[in-house]
Image: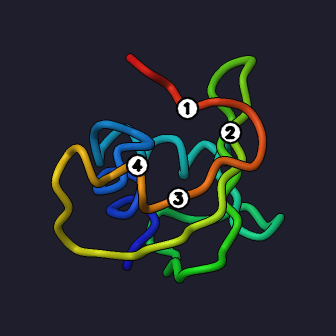
């Protein structure tokens, strides 16, 4: 699955366009490498996202095309920081 789509489906970032912009500005990395929005993600990958002055580091535990809102949180495990609750 594409990185921008994963970020939206998992609700780490609420909108795909915002996820794409974050990737294009170099604020998202996978396994310590800056990632494009089209980069493929798989279970076990470590995603790091910089939100202004906050950083979120999470391990992908599940990749699914469609997930209910209440199950989206089960798609990743937070390693550092905290998710954006807005």
Mark-to-mark CA distance, 3 and 2 = 11 Å
Residue 41 disc label: none
Are the residues tagged 1 and 4 within 8 Å (C-beta)? no
- Gap in Å between the C-alphas at discs 4 and 2? 14 Å
Query: Which residue is found at the position 52% from the left and 75% from the top?
Result: 39
**Cα separation between marks 1 and 2:** 6 Å
Task: Bin the neighbour count of mark 2 within 10 Å (Cα to Cα): few under 14, some 14-19, many 20 and up.
Answer: some
Q: Nearer the viewer, mark 1 or mark 4?
A: 4
Q: Which residue is mark 2?
A: 56
Placement of 18 over or under 59, stated as above or below: above
The crowd level at tag 3 (other Cα within 10 Å; few <14, some 14-19, many 20+) is many
Q: Which residue is mark 3?
A: 76
Quadrant of the image occupied by residue 15: top left
Position of the C terminus by quadrant: top left
Give residue 47's position: percent from left, percent from top: 66, 59
The picture quadrant where one finds residue 63 is bottom left
The answer to whether mark 3 and mark 4 are in CB contact below 8 A is yes
**Label 4 crowding class (10 Å Cα cut-off): few <14, some 14-19, many 20+?**
some
The location of residue 1, given as percent across then percent down, is 37, 79
Q: Sequence order check: which comes first, mark 1 or mark 4?
A: 4
Question: Are the residues flagged by discs 3 and 2 in contact, CB closer than 8 Å?
Answer: no
Disc 1: CA contacts within 10 A as few (<14), some (14-19) or many (>=20): some
Residue drawn where x is 56% and y is 65% of the image: 36
Q: Secondary structure at mark 1?
A: loop
Give whichever of 80, 49 is nearer the camera. Answer: 80
Q: Secondary structure at mark 3?
A: strand
Q: Which mark is residue 83?
A: 1
Residue that mark 4 sits on: 73
The mark nearer the N terminus, 1 or 2, is 2
Q: Are marks 1 and 2 in contact (CB under 8 Å)?
A: yes
């Amino acid at each position: 699955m594409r990185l921008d789509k994963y970020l939206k489906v998992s609700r780490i970032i609420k909108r795909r366009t915002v996820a794409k912009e974050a990737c294009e500005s170099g604020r998202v990395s996978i396994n310590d490498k800056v990632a494009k929005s089209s980069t493929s993600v798989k279970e076990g990958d470590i995603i790091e996202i910089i939100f202004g002055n906050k950083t979120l580091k999470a391990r992908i535990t599940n990749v699914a095309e469609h997930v209910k809102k209440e199950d989206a949180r089960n798609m990743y495990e937070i390693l550092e920081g905290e998710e954006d609750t807005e």
